[in-house]
Image: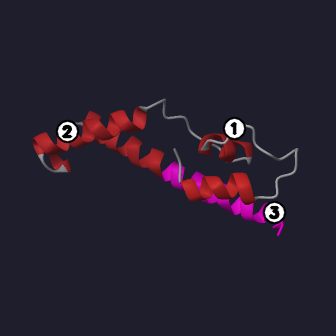
Amino acid sequence: AWYRNAHWFLKRQVAWSKATRPRNWTLDGVAGHLGFKLKRYGTKQATQRLRYTLQFAERYGDIRHFTPTAKAKWTKLLNYNRQDVEALKFATEVGLALGIKPTTN
């Protein structure tokens, strides 16, 4: 699940036209629909990579003792998280550029 406030904003407050309204309201779905190029890291891979690197760090200490596999998993996890933050920023900025729905009082 992605940040609730941005999800609420994009789904409820942005003035989407019927042609621009996304069908899939996940972060990947909205950002991809708006033109953000996403790299696929695999389903549930972030959790697996985080668990692996945390267990490795607990067992062996600092990153100097990490194997190349553990370093690769850590790097992929960081890249995945960076992409999530960039996609969220992109989707929110495009949503703001599309405009806010007028309020009905």
| Tag 3 secondary structure | loop
In the image: residue 30, left or right of residue 44: right
Total label count?
3
- The answer to whether residue 104 shows anywhere in this view is yes
Horizontal and vertical percent position of residue 68: 26, 36
Position of the C terminus, as image quadrant, is: bottom right
Residue 55: mark in rendering = 2
Q: Amino acid at mark 1?
A: Asn
Horizontal and vertical percent position of residue 35: 73, 47
Residue 60: mark in rendering = none
Residue 84 falls inside the magenta stretch? yes
In this rendered view, identify the residue nearer to me: 43 or 60: 43
Q: Is residue 74 above or below residue 90?
A: above
Closer to the N terminus: mark 3 or mark 1? 1
In this rendered view, identify the residue nearer to me: 26 or 31: 26
Horizontal and vertical percent position of residue 60: 11, 42
- Most prominent secondary structure in the magenta stretch? helix
Q: Which residue lies under the disc numbered 3?
A: 101
Q: Residue furthest left?
A: 60
Residue at 83 percent across and 47 percent down: it is: 20
Q: Amino acid at mark 2?
A: Gln
Q: Residue furthest top?
A: 43
Quadrant in the rendering for residue 102: bottom right
Tags 1 and 2 touching, CB below 8 Å? no
Alpha carbon separation for disc pair 2 and 3: 47 Å
Mark whose residue sits in front, 3 or 1: 3
| Tag 1 secondary structure | loop
Q: Residues within 10 Å of mark 2 (few under 14, many from 20)?
A: few
Which region is colored magenta? 82-105
Q: Which residue lies under the disc numbered 1?
A: 24
